[in-house]
Image (cartoon, helix red, strand yellow):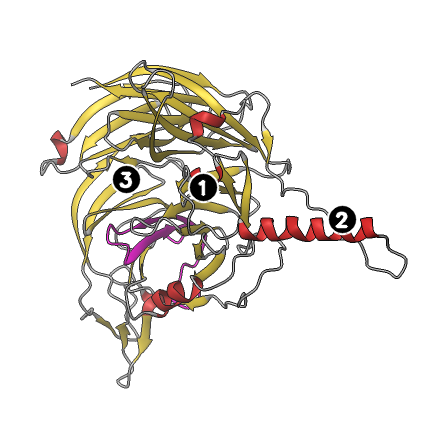
Amino acid sequence: GYQNIFVAKEEHKKEIYSVAWSDDVFVDSKTGSDIQYFATCGGTSVTVYGLTTTTKTLVAQQGYKDPDEGEYMYACVFGGRSLGTPIGFGPMEGVRGDSHDPIILEQPPRKKRARSDAGSSNNDHRDRDKDRGNQDIFCSLLNVASYDGPQLLCVAGKRGIVKVIDVARRMLFATLSGHGDDIYDLKFSPVDEWLLLSASKDESLRLWNLKTTTCVAIFAGHEGHRSEVLATGWHPSGTHFASGGMDTTVKIWSTAENTAVHKGIQRSKQVSPNRWDAKVSGDSKYLAVFDQMPVFSTNKVHLFYVDCVEWVGDFIISKDCMSFVVLWQPLFGKPKTKLTSTNTNTNSTNTINSTNNNNGSKTQRLPCNLVALREFSTNCEVWFVRFGLSPDRSMCALGNTVGEVKVWDIQDPDPTKAHMYSLKQASGCVRMVAFNFNARFLISVCADSTVWVYEFHG
């Protein structure tokens, strides 16, 4: 089973809400050992850890701090690519920072151009030419097509702004603004490492193209969520994703070919990047696609806030704030259920997605039916506690409010026998759990600012 090998206490003394592994594995230039990286966020702080797998050492490699004391980070995720070997930047372990002296997440200072006037000297002209050269260099760095460095790290929270960190150069790479309220979840596409989803308190989801810092699409409106969107998760094919929120519904949205969103993704790749205010050539006037119609919507799975949702193949596993985790299959066939206008039983269908037909009855517009397959539960009656799935989707790990992590075999046909391990750790709430790429290591982060690392011993 899993055994605890490290416990780290972060100095900011805030709840740690999120943990994310990088897909990259680097080799230590001195020892030859593999190093895997993960990041945590809580309060205004972001910490990047390096875990040496052979010697089993854990080091806080980099620390970042948001200058806005009103910020509170709720989500972090690795994706995209930072500036790598073309300009001599090596892997993350080659440019280690100091977590005790955090890097402030601010836009890099940029020089203002001198004004041209009749009395300007040759030195003034040389200064302007040099400044124009710096501008050109800055703009050239916006072309990320050839970037092959470590993955970028995206963080977001209370201020509703996604901040993109280049962990190789240890700087703020870009900011993504658009949401009108807190951002609760971030997920990168499994088939395009530059496409990022964000879920927000403003009742919407946004799809971003990180390569061009473009908001590709907004998912909200008529058939969208009616309250805060707490979680999202991509289908393995990358052609659709699920979302869950405080309205107790789970919705599925499409990005498949021939949809407006897919066409928007292709158009967004032609936009000239604009990280802050750099003047660049090309068409930068891209208008985001506005998608108001999910392809599936149901409130039949959960009665409370849905704060975590992921895909297991073509099945969905979702959790609500009353500790129920359900594995289920959405049925995409057209619904046959009709409700007369006098029917008061609204539990049998999602009446938000109904419309009047010529006969005066209400017909379900969106597929909403499903087949429940498994159900798991734990002592976790608070919201914003997230499970983690192993890469092969065979195991699900979830913390609770009494400092315990439970691991289930979600493929076991008998739910009563699915419980595999129970890991007792902190005395407070375990906010999130995450497996590394081969499920050898398991990380949990807690409300008492602690980070727990487990290793599997077969």
Q: For residue 325: magenta? A: no
The residue singled out by tag 2 in the image is: 127
Amino acid carrying mark 2 in the image: Asp
Name, please, the residue furthest toward the right: 119
Horizontal side, residue 288 vs residue 325: left or right? right
**Residue 379: x, y in percent?**
31, 29
Amino acid carrying mark 3 in the image: Phe
User: Marks 2 and 1, Cα distance to the nearest angstrom?
Assistant: 28 Å
Q: Secondary structure at mark 2?
A: helix
The residue singled out by tag 1 in the image is: 86
At x 34% / y 65%, what residue is drawn? 262
Query: Looking at the rendered structure, which numbered label has been put on residue 324?
Result: 3
User: Marks 3 and 1, Cα distance to the nearest angstrom?
Assistant: 49 Å
Task: Decide: is 405 above or below 213.
Answer: above
Task: Decide: is 458 above or below 18.
Answer: above
- Please tell me which of labels 3 and 2 falls first in the chain: 2
Number of callouts:
3
Name, please, the residue furthest toward the left: 413
The one of 234 and 352 positioned closer to us in this rendering: 234
Q: Secondary structure at mark 3?
A: strand
Q: Secondary structure at mark 1?
A: helix
- Please tell me which of labels 3 and 1 falls first in the chain: 1
- Please tell me which of labels 2 and 1 falls first in the chain: 1
Quadrant of the image occupied by residue 368 = bottom left
**Residue 39: x, y in percent?**
43, 31
Q: Is residue 105 visible?
A: yes
- Range drawn in magenta: 221-248
Mark 3, other Cα within 10 Å: few <14 / some 14–19 / many ≥20: many
At x 47% / y 66%, what residue is drawn? 288
Mark 1, other Cα within 10 Å: few <14 / some 14–19 / many ≥20: few
The N terminus is located in which quarter? top left
